Amino acid sequence: MMKKNIFGGALIILFGAAILTSCNSREFGEQQKLAVADTINQLMHQVTRSAEKASVDSTFQWLSDDSSAVFMAGGMAYSAREITSVFRNQYSKIKSQQMERLSSRTLVFSKDAAAWIGVIKCKLISKEEEVNEMYLVETWLWQREPSGWKVIHYHESWMNLPDACKRATVEYALEDFAKELRGKALKPADMPPLLTKFLKENPLVYGSTLAFVPSEANGQMRGAAPYIYRYGSDFKQVDLPETYDYTVSEWYAVPVDQKKSCWSNPYYDDGGGGVVMVTYSIPLYDKQNKLTGVLTSDVELK
C-alpha cells in the first residue's frame, strides 16, 4: 500500500509545448508571470463558485467560440455549445452542490497563455435526495484573446467515492474483524490466512493489511505489513519493503494520531494491488492498550 498521489501529474505537455514555443522569456519577467497567475486564479475562483451554484451560463461563460477548441468530460470531446448543453442537463437534476478545492496549480507559459490544474471534492445532492460524492480532476487551458481571457481547452475526469451504504458495510466488517484481533499477541506471520479469510467473507473489500508498529533491529526501524489483495478470482500476498516508512502514509498516520478509525483520501496503490483506492483504517491495540498497528480495508475506485 505504497501511496502515490494520483493528482500530481496532469498531462498538458502537448499544449504546453505548443505555447512555450511562442513565449519570449526575455520580454516576460517573474512579476508578469505572477500577475497572470493571479488573474487566472481569480477567474477559476469565479468558475468554481458558479459551478457550486449549478449556474451553467456563468460556469462556462469563458469558453472560446473558436471551432478548434475542444472541451472534454467523461472521456467525450465537445464543442463549447455541446458541453454547455451537457452540463445544463446535468445541473437540472441537482438540488445542491458543494465543492471543496483540495489543491490547485497554475502554470504560466507566456503573458497570453496559462493552465490551471485543480483537484476538487464534490458532494452532489439530487432533487430525489440522492447523495453522490466524487473527486474531480480538472485542467483548464486559458488564452488571452482580443475580448479577454478565454478557455481554449477544458478536461474533467472524476472518481465516485463509495456511497453511504457501501461505506457502512466496509466499516462494520472491519470493526468486527478488529474485535476478533484486539488484545491478541499478533505476529506478521499470523496475518495472511486471517486477511484472506476476511476478504473471502467481504467481497466489497479489495485488499487488507495489518501494518504493525515498526520495531528497531540493528539500529534500524523496520516495519511489517503483509498485504492480501484480490487478483481475479484468487488472492495475492505482497509484503511492503522493510525500509518503506508506511507510518507517514495517510491511511496509517491519521488513525494513529487521532486514535480512531477513519477513511483516507483516494490514492494510487503503487506497491500493492496497483489500483486507485480509498482505505478505511482502524488503530489496533493490545491488552496493555499499546498500539499493535493499523488494520485496513481498501475499496477500489472505478
Image (tube, rainbow, N blue to C red):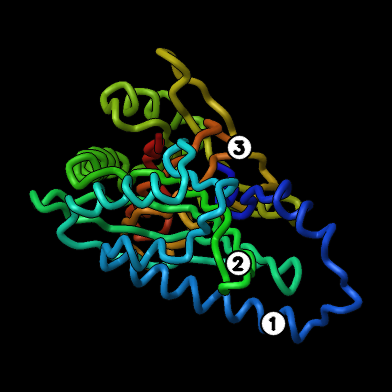
Kind of residue at badge 2:
Arg
Taking the view exactly as shown, the residue that stands out farthest to the bottom is: 31
Of residues 129 and 236, the one nearer the viewer is: 129
Note whether residue 49 is visible: yes
Q: Give the number of the disc on residue 271.
A: 3
Q: Which residue is mark 2?
A: 105
Image quarter of residue 169 = top left
Mark 2 vs 3: CB contact within 8 A: no
Kind of residue at badge 1:
Leu
- What residue appears at the point 53 percent right and 25 percent down from the top-left corner? 237
Mark 2 or mark 3: name the one nearer the start of the chain.
Answer: 2
Marks 1 and 2 sit apart, C-alpha to C-alpha, by 13 Å
Note whether residue 284 is visible: no
Mark 1 vs 2: CB contact within 8 A: no
Q: Which residue is mark 1?
A: 34
Mark 1 or mark 2: name the one nearer the start of the chain.
Answer: 1
Kind of residue at badge 3:
Gly
Instruction: Tell me the crowding category of disc 1: few under 14, some 14 to 19, or many 20 or more residues within 10 angstroms, Cα based.
Output: few
Question: In the picture provided, is 18 more to the left or to the right than 38?
Answer: right
The secondary structure type at the circle numbered 2 is strand
Tell which tag, 2 or 3, sits nearer the viewer: 2
The secondary structure type at the circle numbered 3 is loop
Tell which tag, 1 or 2, sits nearer the viewer: 1
- Above/below status of 31 relative to 277: below
Where residue 160 sits: x, y (%)?
34, 44
Location of the N terminus by quadrant is: top right
